Amino acid sequence: MNAPAGRDGLLISARALAAELAPVTGPAQAPVVLDARWRLAGPPGIDSYQQGHLPGAVFADLDRDLAGPPGPPGPGGRHPLPDPAAFQAAMRAAGVSGGRPVVVYDDGDGMAAARGWWTLRYFGHADVRVLDGGYRAWTEAGLPVTTDMTATAPGDFTAEPGHMPVLDAAGAQAMARDGLLLDARAGERYRGEAEHVDPVAGHIPGAVSAPTARNANPDGTFRDPAELTARFTTLGAAPGPTSPAGASPGAPGPSPPAGAPPGAPGPNPPADAPADTPGAGTPPAPLVGAYCGSGVTAAHEVLALALVGIPAALYVGSWSDWITDPARPIATGP
């Protein structure tokens, strides 16, 4: 399967998706559409799905399908990675196959849809896009919705973990020290001024506040590439030949060095690299990671970075994992 390249390989507009779903396309070529609507404080996304969804869309529960069970408070965070076998079964039940494109949408802010995009990519699906602007963009374009429950033929997707870079707590700490770790939560949560979800407020020392809501326009669509590039450059992230940004957007970076956390991006060239080493003589672009409260909004940050050619590692457990070990340091303030 040849996935579309660049921004077109990551996002799709409502009109373009409608064209791909047109009957002339045929079910074998049309994308599988996953409805991933979800809100942290509820109501459950299935309620929204039952009240109306894109024709042919199948509901994917973020808590059940796109994350593993959190269990009692402890390592892993509130939305840990799902078990590969469980994720594979859920995606097959939704009709997902390895050779057929997938489009994920949510209400419109792109947060839950980005977690769906990232999880499918992590488990090896090569052609996953997010509906830019989500359900809101679809309905505002005057496109049809339905309350019919979709009868879906099972897919053949095989979940193979490791296709996107990830961080554990040690990797996040190292990224904050040696690279660039972006905190995708709202600024007041980063600063420790307010924390309405997790029992401890603050941020990982060395992390940079980068609320992912600023990656989007007021209607929930992603900002244009020039604006995103300017934003991330200001934050200290920019694509460059010596960083993982040399990979295709949304693709994993180089192999990690020995002792790095599983799935972590590869290293920068050594400072004493010979002059003919690619990237020698210019400062290497920083390695980039992202975290949030539980690995959902940070997936949106990773997608926004990918849109401008900057692959980034996701700390899936995020803050809700970090704070489970009282020995880990916590910072507050700007």
Image (cartoon, rainbow, N blue to C red):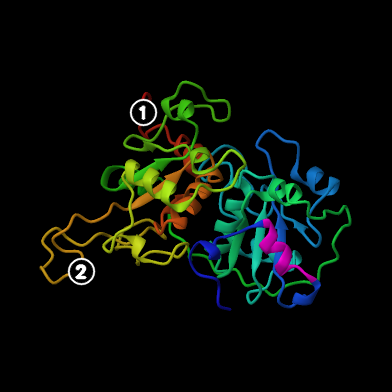
Q: Residue at 13%, 60% (x, y): give it.
A: 281
The residue where tag 1 is placed is 331
The residue where tag 2 is placed is 278
Q: Inspect the image, locate mark 1, and give the three-letter code of the amino acid beneath it.
A: Ala
Q: Residue at 66%, 61% (x, y): give it.
A: 103
Foreground residue among 161 and 111: 111
Image-quadrant location for residue 205: top left
**Crowd tier of the residue under label 1, counting other residues whose Cα lies within 10 Å: few below 14, some 14–19, many 20 or above:** some
Measured in 3D between alpha carbons, the distance from the residue under mark 1 to the one under mark 2, in whole angstroms, is 37 Å
Foreground residue among 184 and 230: 230
Q: Quadrant of the N terminus?
A: bottom right
Would you say the magenta stretch is mainly helix, strand or loop? helix
Q: Which residues are magenta?
A: 14-22
Question: What element does badge 1 sit on?
Answer: loop
The answer to if 15 sits in the magenta stretch is: yes
Q: Is residue 169 above or below residue 326?
A: below
Q: Tell me: 22 left or right of 68.
A: right
Q: Inspect the image, locate mark 2, and give the three-letter code of the amino acid beneath it.
A: Pro
Could you say where residue 284 lies in the image, as x and y percent from the top left? Answer: 23, 56
